[in-house]
Amino acid sequence: QHLPAPAMLRELLPLLTLGLHLGFAALALALFHRTFSRIFKAHPRLRLALIAFCVLVALALYGGSRWLALPPSVFVDLFGTANLLLLAMVVGSWMTTALSRPAELVPVCLVMSLVDIFSVSRGPSRFIAGRIEEFYLKGREGLPPVGDFLLIKMTLPGGSATFPVFGVSDWIIVAFLALAAARFGFNDNLLGPGLAALGQRKRPALYFPLPAAALLLAVLLAQFAGVFLPALPIISVVFLAFLFVRYPDSRQLLRTDWLLVLTAFAAMAALMLLPPR
């Protein structure tokens, strides 16, 4: 047997590190659900307090970088990433409280996907991505743009810098869909029992939900294609396809659901017909 060439290992290392980081984030999501699901039911205001705390931490990191002119730091970047992941999980859990039927996930996913497509192609995400790309191509010289503080970052083993992999909004949707699956008793865990069942187990178990795998697929497609791809449509398509096949209740859309989807498509078409600025 031949060992992989060093060049091949260097090419595979970022992909393996990305998968490892997403795996730890997924386990953090499972731990979050097991720890806070009952607490939030008993104390709903605690969710708002956590959101406010995470926002204040993010603002403090942003202010320290802009006004104190702090140099880039791996520790600060990873601390900011941990804070954004916690914020995303809290917001995602809050979004699930509005769901009463599994079929409601269909219009929610479609509307979010349309908004993300427009934002990336013609909206603010396009501008933000351009500023961030310019900042990193220049070696992170000068003050970082605001959008840089909304990115989930990682670092390679032994690395002296971090680099962004996806936005906090992507993990909000991953958390929302995974926690929604747990809310309705669906099993979207690719490595074992679902999130709802994991909360009742005393033995440790592996957890990697389908939305996280879809996010990993979206990031890999963007890397191989060399373009900025919106992740939410890929996550939504993969997750909805899974729901339609495994859980028939998700296909029972009401008239209001169809009206919401059609309205979103019409609004998207109207916006796309507008001349670009």
Image (cartoon, rainbow, N blue to C red):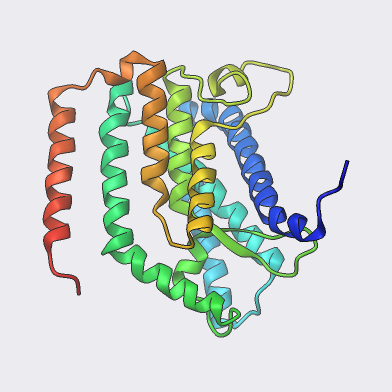
Residue 131 placement: quadrant: bottom left
What percent of the width, then of the height, locates residue 224?
A: 53, 56
Instruction: State how many labels appear.
Output: 0
* Residue at figure coordinates x 67%, y 16% from the top left: 201
Q: Is residue 270 left or right of residue 40?
A: left
Q: Nearer the viewer, residue 207 or 182?
A: 207
Residue 140 vertical position relative to residue 262 in the rendered view, above or below = below
Residue 127 placement: quadrant: bottom left
What percent of the width, then of the height, locates residue 170?
A: 45, 48
Is the N terminus in the top left, top right, bottom left or bottom right quadrant? top right
Q: Is residue 256 left or right of residue 157?
A: left
What percent of the width, then of the height, locates residue 150?
A: 48, 61
Residue 108 vertical position relative to residue 82 in the rendered view, above or below = above
* Residue at figure coordinates x 52%, y 28% from the top left: 37
Is the C terminus in the top left, top right, bottom left or bottom right quadrant? bottom left
Name the residue at the right extreme.
1
Residue 196 vertical position relative to residue 262 in the rendered view, above or below = above
What percent of the width, then of the height, locates residue 266?
A: 11, 46
Q: Is residue 125 left or right of residue 252?
A: right
* Residue at figure coordinates x 15%, y 30% from the top left: 258
Residue 35 placement: quadrant: top right
Q: Is residue 2 visible?
A: yes
* Residue at figure coordinates x 58%, y 84% from the top left: 141
Name the residue at the front extreme.
1
Q: Is residue 64 left or right of residue 170?
A: right
Q: Is residue 49 visible?
A: no
